[in-house]
Image (cartoon, helix red, strand yellow):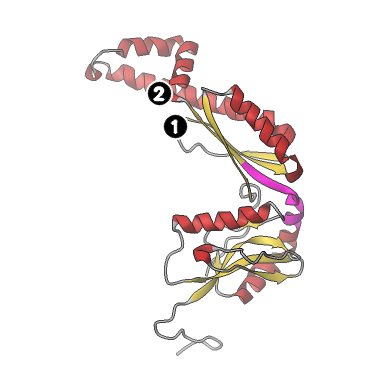
Amino acid sequence: MTAPGRTRPAQGAREKGCYVYGILPGDVELTPDARGLRDHEVDLVRHGDIAALVSDIDLGGPIGRPEDLTAHERLLDAAAVEVPVLPMRFGAVLTSREAVERELLAANHDQFLAALDEIEGRVEYILKGRYDERAVLREIMSENPDAARLLEQIRDRPEELTRDARIRLGEFINQAISAKRDADTQGAAQALSEYAQASVPRRPTHPEDAVQVAFLVETDRRSEFEKAVAKIAEEWQGRVDLRLLGPTAPYDFVITPSTGA
């Protein structure tokens, strides 16, 4: 027996859901070539002054392939350059377009509209840097005589005879890199604060990460911001391999409700 108002999918048919990428102003129009996950055509579900960027998705298999995440971010990042975007968490699915309008848009209309107004004309950049291993070790040894002495104690000596010294040196190096990371992250954020509306430090993902910070930048100051980053990269040349990712949707600066099928 099926519940009132619902029909059971035909045997062998795939159940479909509505995948939600993000929230946009209600007056936007999509380009004909816009594509989402699995190369599906994307559409807008509108309610009041806001709209959800959506596409149909088969629920028979998992969502989470690397290419799925790439498609999700590519669509949002392209939109963010043109209009304000509130990105949904990757994997947000509701049962139908009617559910998107009722449970997501109508239930959060004023909150979403205020958030869109707040990020109007702004995009996100992510600054990532990783220390050059040899350069940072030279730096640590030149600044810390105790670490340099430990290095001399273990140089050209068997590992089994210098185990304790190697452990102490490893701990010393990790602590020194952590302190440098904190200082360099703060320095980069301060140097770029003139060109950004806000910044959020991110957790390091590698022991030799030097900096990882997200910046919210006004679209008409993108060129200034990128030039300021290039100046830092020049100053850190040979010490830190610096990369700038973006512009992207403001993933680190907005919070949208989680949802699921």
Picture coordinates of residue 75 (x, y %)? Answer: 59, 58
Which residue appears at 58% of the width and 60% of the height?
Answer: 258
Any part of residue 127 in sight: yes
Q: Quadrant of residue 134?
A: top left
- Residues in magenta, as a range: 114-125
Which one is nearer the viewer's eye here, 46 or 37? Answer: 37
Q: Where is residue 79 in the image (x, y as percent from the top left)?
A: 66, 56
The residue drawn where x is 62% and y is 71% is: 100
- The disc label shown at residue 171, or none: 2
Please tell me whether residue 172 is drawn above or below residue 58 in the rendered image: above
* Position of residue 27 in the picture relative to residue 161 (left or right): right
Q: Judge whether residue 187 can be spotted in this image.
A: no
Q: Is residue 120 part of the magenta span, yes or no?
A: yes
The mark closer to the camera, 1 or 2, is 1
Please name the residue that numbered disc 1 is placed on: 207
The mark found on residue 32 in the picture is none
Whether the residues at callouts 1 and 2 have beta carbons within 8 Å, the answer is no
Residue density around tag 2, few if under 14, some if 14–19, many if 20 or more, within 10 Å: few
Of helix, strand and loop, which one carries label 2? Answer: helix
- Is 33 on the left-hand or right-hand side of 12? right
Magenta run includes residue 76: no
Residue type of the residue flagged with mark 2: Glu
Q: Relative to residue 221, is residue 253 drawn left or right? A: left
